[in-house]
Amino acid sequence: MNTTIVCRTADDMEALGRSFGEKCRPGSVISLRGSLGAGKTVFAKGVARSLGITEAIVSPTFTLVQEYEGRLPMYHMDLYRITSEEDFQMIGGEDMLYSDGVCLIEWSEVIDSMLPKNTLFIDIKVNDDQSRTVSVVGGEA
């Protein structure tokens, strides 16, 4: 897949996440990239809702990983504070990455070489008018 979408509001971003979440299967990996405040966690909320997760979705910046139960388990990771693949392995990241759940990974650049071939890359850019341009590249959700 290779497409670009413009989201004008947070609701648009969440709806986009829902649409991708509906396509998720066991083992789906989604890399969320963008600056701080770009909307990565809002996108993750949409994915979670499509998986039937009703609890509050919060950024895992300080916990590194938030686990949620829905029609599929969802592992929401924030690797902003991870500096190496070894750090990722020490938190059990590889087990989650290759699980039967759905992995949403913010700041995945540090583990690029570990990502499965079917990883879906979601790049979010904040525009001058505060809309978001979302570029989607890669395999399956």
Image: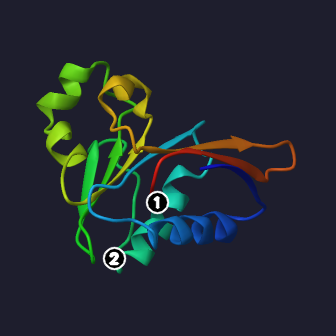
Residue under the point 18% across and 20% down: 86
Tell me residue 53's x, y (percent). Answer: 34, 76
Task: Residue type at mark 2: give it.
Answer: Ile
Residue under the point 27% across and 62% down: 26
Task: Residue type at mark 1: give it.
Answer: Ala
6 lies above or below 61 = below
* 136, 68: nearer the viewer: 136
Instruction: Assess disc 2: are there few (<14), some (14-19) or many (≥20) residues with their C-alpha within 10 Å of its C-alpha.
Output: some
34 lies above or below 133 = above
* Mark linked to residue 65: none
Q: Are marks 1 and 2 in contact (CB under 8 Å)?
A: no
* Mark linked to residue 44: 1
Q: Is residue 121 left or right of residue 5?
A: left
Residue 9 lies in quadrant: bottom right
Q: Distance from label 1 to label 2 (Cα)?
A: 11 Å
Q: How many marks?
A: 2
Residue under the point 33% across and 38% down: 116
Q: Is residue 50 left or right of residue 103?
A: right
Residue under the point 60% across and 36% down: 35
Colour pattern = rainbow
Residue 7 lies in quadrant: bottom right
Tell me residue 85's x, y (percent). Answer: 25, 22
Tell me residue 115's x, y (percent). Answer: 34, 34
Question: Label 2 belongs to which residue?
Answer: 53
